[in-house]
Amino acid sequence: MNESRDAANDVDSINRLTASGEGRSTEIPDSHEDLLEKKSFAHLASLGPRGEPHSHPVWYDAAGGELLVSTGTDRQKYRNIQRDPRVSVSILDPDNPYRYLEVRGRVIRIEPDPEKAFLDRLARKYLDQDTYPYEERRSADRVILHIQPDHVVAG
C-alpha cells in the first residue's frame, strides 16, 4: 500500500487538536500525589538536537505544583532543555507498575545548585544518605530543572 501523505498537514492537524488544551488537567490528582514521595525513577523525555526523542531515567521531587529534577550542566538533557524546554515525564508506581503518572510540560526555570543541596535532598530520599556519594557526578556543575505541568495523565 503506497499512501501519499503531506507531513505539513499532519503537523497542522496535530497542533489544532492539541492546542486548545480543553479537558486537560494541569495538576497531579490527589489519587496519585503519593507517587511523588515514593522512591521511584522517572523517565524524562526531551528533544535532541535533531528533534529526536531522548529519554533519561532520573530521580525527582516535587514542590509548589512543579516537578524538580537535578542534572549536571554537562549532560545531554541539559543541552536539550536549553534549546527546547518541552519535556514529558513518566513515573511508574514501584508497588504497582500498572499505576502511573505522565506529565507533559515545560522547564520554566533552571536554578543553579552550587552547594548541591537539592542533590543531597534526593540522596536522602533515594539512598538514605545525607550526602550524594558519587564524587564524579557530584563534582559537575549542578542545576535544578523546574517542570511546570501543562498536561497530566494519571493511570
Image (cartoon, rainbow, N blue to C red):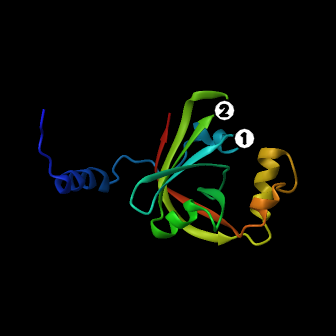
Q: Amino acid at mark 1?
A: Lys
Q: Earlier in the sequence, mark 1 or mark 2?
A: 1
Q: Amino acid at mark 2?
A: Pro
Residue 54, label in figure: none
Between 139 and 101, the residue placed more toward the observer is 139
Residue 94, label in figure: 2
**Residue sitting at 45 percent across and 65 percent down?**
84
- Up-down: is 43 above or below 77? above
Between 141 and 113, the residue placed more toward the observer is 141
**Residue sitting at 78 percent across and 47 percent down?**
125
**Residue sitting at 45 percent across and 59 percent down?**
48
x, y percent for residue 38: 71, 40
Cβ atoms under marks 1 and 2 closer than 8 Å = yes
- Up-down: is 142 above or below 121? below
User: Is disc 1 placed on a helix, strand or loop?
Assistant: loop
| Apparent side of residue 4 relative to residue 106 in the rendered image (left or right) | left
- Up-down: is 137 above or below 102? below
Between 113 and 23, the residue placed more toward the observer is 113
| Apparent side of residue 18 relative to residue 43 in the rendered image (left or right) | left
Residue 39, label in figure: 1
x, y percent for residue 33: 63, 42
- Up-down: is 127 above or below 74? above
x, y percent for residue 99: 56, 31
- 10 Å neighbourhood of mark 1: few (<14), some, or many (≥20)? some
